[in-house]
Image (tube, helix red, strand yellow):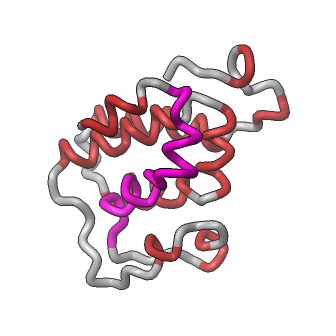
Amino acid sequence: GALKNCLFDDEHHFWLLHEVGVLTPLLLPLVGGEGFVEEDREGMDPLLWMQGPEKVREPDADVRLTLMECVLLLCRKRRSREELRRRQAYCVVRQADEAEPDEHEEWAELVYKVVNLLQRDEAAGGGGGRGGEMNA
């Protein structure tokens, strides 16, 4: 919860991603034991893909929801979105979404927003407002 509060100030995202290293701790609880294909692992922190089949995804739905909200907050600035793409955050989000029960509507809405931000073509004018900023 405290990290989520810090992420509302998007001026600190670069520092949080590069100096503090918050991305792996945010994504690790969303990872299950399914594993990732080699293409998905390129650029991803090995800690995320070396977990093995015994890795259990965070069991608490509220915690998973908060983690996905944090990822969405990190998508507010273009520079942060580019870093999330480079580090293959989308692959973790995709796997976590596939494992999530279909009746979890709030989760589905968050994932939809994150995926749209991470998968869009920034060069084709999809960069949002001034400097690629979003009001996520």
* Nearer to me, 105 or 77: 77
Q: What is the residue that sits farthest to the left in this orientation?
A: 60
Task: Decide which of 58, 80 is in the foreground and name it.
Answer: 80
Against 53, residue 126 (above or below) is above
Q: Position of residue 5 (x, y in %)?
A: 32, 29
Q: Would you say residue 112 sits in the magenta stretch?
A: no
Q: Which residues are magenta?
A: 10-32
Residue 75, image x and y in percent? 55, 35
**Residue at image location 76% in from the left, 34% down from the top:** 122
> If the image is split into quadrants, where does the N terminus sit?
top left
**Residue 104 point in image, percent of width and height:** 25, 40
Q: Is residue 107 left or right of residue 113?
A: left
Task: Write the residue at 57% across / 67% down.
Answer: 44
Q: Is residue 34 above or below residue 79?
A: below
Q: Residue at x 60, y 35 (%)?
A: 117
The image shows residue 38 at horizontal and vertical percentages of: 62, 79
Provide the major secondary structure of the magenta segment. helix
